[in-house]
Amino acid sequence: MKLGAFMMPAHPQHRSLHDGHYHDLDTLEFFDRTGFAEAWIGEHYMMPAEPCPSPDLLLAQAFLRTKRIRLAPGAFMLPFHHPAELAHRICMLDHISQGRLMVGIGASGTNLDLEMFDIDYRSGAHREMTAESIAIMTRFWESDGPFEYRGKYWTARRPADLPDKRSTYHLKPFQAPYPPIGVTGLSASSPTLRLAGANGWIPISFCFTPQYLHTHWDVVEAGARAAGRPAPDRSEWRVSRPILVADTDREAWRRAVDGEMGRYFRDDYLPMLAGNNALGLLKEDPGMPDSDVTVEYVARHCWIVGSPDTVRERIEAMQALSGGFGVLHVMGFDHLDEMSAIRDSHAALAEIVANLRD
C-alpha cells in the first residue's frame, strides 16, 4: 500500500487566502519529504471553507518545490472550463511536472458554483457537459490533424496548421497519450466509479462508511465489464479518509475532535451535508436520526483516530472489508495552529503504512 493525501483544501474562515495558499504549498513540500506518493487538490468557488478556485496555480508552484510526489487537481470541474483551453493548461502543467501530473475530473456537486456559471444542475446538464468536455480534451491530446467537435454544449476545433508552421497546434501532454485521469465517489455503488471502470480511470473512494466500501470496487469492475475492458487493478484504487495518529487513543481523540479537523466538520461539513439532506452519507444505520450525526459520532465511526496500534488495526480492517486497495489517502486539513501535532501524525501514518502487511 502507498500513502497519499486528499486536500479540499479546507481552511478556517479567519485564515487569509494568502496564508492558506502558502500553508497548502508548505504542506505539499512536507508530504514530499515524508514519502507520500501523491496528493490531490480540490476546486471550489462559493465555499469559503474550501477556498481554491484554481488548483493548478497551487500545483504549478508545488511541482517546482517538490521532487518525487505526484500531484493532481482533485478535481477540475469540467463544466466551468472550455475544454480547448483546459486541455492546453493540462498539457503545460504536465510538462512543468515532467510527468508527475495526474488529473482528477468532476461535474461539481456544489449547487451555488453551478448556479454562478448558469448551469442547470437539476436537469443533469453538468454531467452531460463533463462527458462532452473530456471527449473534446482527449481528442485534442490524441489528434494527429485537424478536427471539429460540435456537441450540445461545446464546440471546438483543431484548425489546419499554417504552411509556414508559425501558427500550429503544437502542445501535447508530456505523458503519452495524456496524464492518468481519476474520479471520486462517495455514495454506495457510486455511479461515478462505474464510469471509472468503464473508461479505465483511477477510482477514488471517499470512505466515511466502510461497510459500503466494497460496493465501490464492485461497480468499478461492473463498469469495466460492461465496456469490454480488462479487469481493473486494485492497486489503482485510492481510498480517502480522515485519519489522526497520536501516542494514545485518548490524545488522538482530543486532537481530532477539539482541533481543526473537528471544527471543520462541526462548523462547515456537517451543516453543508444537512443543508443538502445528505447526512445519510455518514450513517452506519440509515434509520438513525440526523441529530445523532455529531462530530463525536463521525470521529468514532467515520474517521480513523487513535494510537499507532489502533490506527494500524483499523486500516487493516478496512483493507479486509474492502477486498484490498492500493493507495490510502489521508484527508488534509488546515493545521497552521497545530503544526507539530498534525505533522507528527502524518509522519507516524507514513511509518504505519510503510510497515503494513501486503
Image: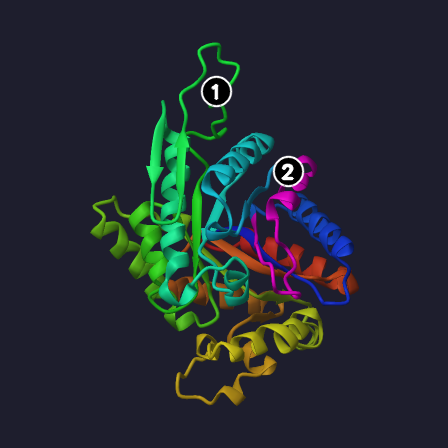
User: At label 1, which amino acid type do we have?
Assistant: Thr
* Closer-to-camera residue (126/65): 126
Residue extent of the magenta highlight: 39-67
* Closer-to-camera residue (108/301): 108
Residue 152 magenta-highlighted: no
Relative to 207, say whether 234 is above or below: above
Relative to 79, say whether 162 is above or below: above
The image quarter containing residue 268 is: bottom right
Relative to 240, say whether 78 is above or below: above
The image quarter containing residue 334 is: bottom right
* Residue 91: percent from left, percent from top: 51, 33
Specify whether residue 323 is in view. Answer: no
User: At label 2, which amino acid type do we have?
Assistant: Phe
User: Which residue matches tag 1?
Assistant: 168
Residue 44 magenta-highlighted: yes
Residue 280 is labelled as none
Mark 2: secondary structure: helix
User: Which residue matches tag 2?
Assistant: 63
Packing grade of label 2 (10 A; few <14, some 14-19, many >=20) is many
